[in-house]
Amino acid sequence: TTTELRTTPAVSAIPLEDMDRRHLLHPHQWGASPERTVMVSGRGCTVRDVRDREFLDVSGAGNWACQVGHGRAELVEAGARQLGELAYFSGFFGFSSDKAVELAARLAGLAPDGMDRVFFTSGGSEGVETALKVARLFHHRRGEPDRTWIISRTMAYHGATYGSGTATGFPPMQEGVGPNLPHVVKVSPPYPYRAQEMYGSADVTGYLLQELEETIQRIGPQRIAAMIGEPVMGGGGILVPPDDYWPRVRELLSRHGILLIADEVVTAFGRVGSWLDSPARGMAPDMIVTAKGLTSGYAPLGAVLFRDEIAETVAGGDAYFFHGHTYSAHPTACAVALANVGVLEKDGLIERAHVVADWFREDLAGLTGLPMVGDVRIAGATAGIEIVTGPQDATPVMAGAVTAEMRHRHAVILREYGPTVVLSPPLVIERDEVRRTAAALTDVIERLRPDGTVRQ
Ligand code: PMP
């Protein structure tokens, strides 16, 4: 059972918003924009702010998380119980906790055969950082220390620390903070909607495979440690690859002894309709990085899954794995994750992602008739709506005004990634909530002008 949404503001709203502007440096803060929505409470897909305004959360707590919805009692109780039992103990030097062990075993059970080892982090960037270091260390320990290069893709989002931030395929992440991580190279992403302008008349996978092979040859196959990629690109705007893309990439990398890291920070735990997406997409990854949906965002936790051979090489025998964080395998975060995985299973939420996908297909279909909607892409319980100037030239239109209008006029929270409006709701979203979102989007996009502003 869950308690009701708190309906009275906890403190006066105005001073809190002012204090925020004065004292809080936000992640990905956009200049000195005065916009603040200070959240205080959430249940299911509804959140409430300090001004007592109620919003429909179609963003997964603003960040692709919250699979089980807000305020789930099982997670609250698991966290509270563990705080009382043993809030935290280090995982260094042979110490462990019952919850970390249970969770690691649970995740190994969800992973493909031969992928039985798990390293816990506090989130996605730390997980990607871990995977990149382990890729280099694996080759180093096997006598190939020159394998240092990492292949990533433009439009990829992998995190904001130095390694993960360099692997990220958006230049602003690297601007002004260099030198960035050396030996990172980017190849093109699969972007079927823009195939003509990106790949000419070539077949999408054929073009990308040739580019990848040329990149490998240019650097030298013996100098490349790993490629990293999201099975479906989230921050790039829900870019779903052709079916033959990952199997053929995997085959090419294997031929050259290059590891493949699946960044499933967004896709895992039901977001695109499976516990883990990369095995189903034919990636056969050597490592899988997860976070977000692992705890539904209720606690900061990530998990990196390794093929046994990799874990053995970097941390077996007498090999010292000189890597780890104070909060690696945090017992309370692990307890919350176990409860979260339990709810995902008990409530059939992985399967429900497919139901949500059907609702998206039904309700968002109407949007494709609007002149400024270039493409609607659906992958399980996430969807991307790409905004363009019009059917003739399909120039991308930045979608910030759409999400702002959705938030302020319709009280629906979405995210935008460049020209793409993204839906990523809790998996418990209801039929009428999807309908309401689609109707509001229709209203806003109908009023959108090609310069990206919304007619009032
Ligand atoms: N990888 C992907 C695919 C992501 O989308 C994100 C975050 N949006 C990250 C890594 C980084 O995770 P975090 O923000 O938890 O560090």
Image (tube, helix red, strand yellow):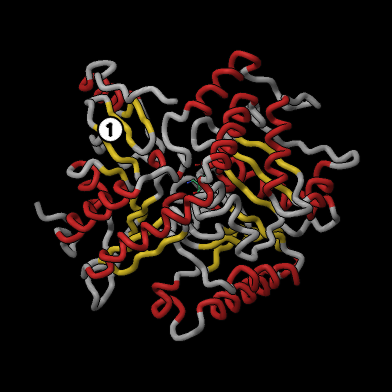
Instruction: Give x and y (percent) for residue 288.
Output: 65, 51
Task: Tell which of 105 and 348 is nearer to you.
Answer: 348
- Disc 1: residue Cβ within 8 A of ligand 1's nearest atom: no
Residue 439 lies, in percent from the top left, at: 22, 54
- Quarter of the figure with the N terminus: top left
The spot of residue 159 in percent (x, y) is: 52, 46
Left or right of 231? Residue 370 is left
Q: Nearer the viewer, residue 246 or 103?
A: 103
Q: Which residue sits at x=72%, y=44%? A: 108
Residue at the image point whose x is 33% and y is 35% from the top? 46
Residue, disc 1: 37
Bin the neighbour count of mark 1 within 10 Å (Cα to Cα): few under 14, some 14-19, many 20 and up: some
Residue 451: x and y, percent? 18, 62
Most distant residue in the left direction: 456
Residue 179 seen in this snapshot: no
> Residue at point 22% right, 72% down?
390
| SS for dot 1 | loop
Q: Nearer the viewer, residue 381 or 117?
A: 381
Residue 172 relative to residue 35: left or right: right
- Check the image and name the residue furthest to the top: 84
Q: Image check: 58 left or right of 217? A: left
State whether residue 28 is above or below residue 372. Answer: above
Indicate the quadrant where residue 279 lies: bottom right
* Residue 455 appears in the rendering: yes
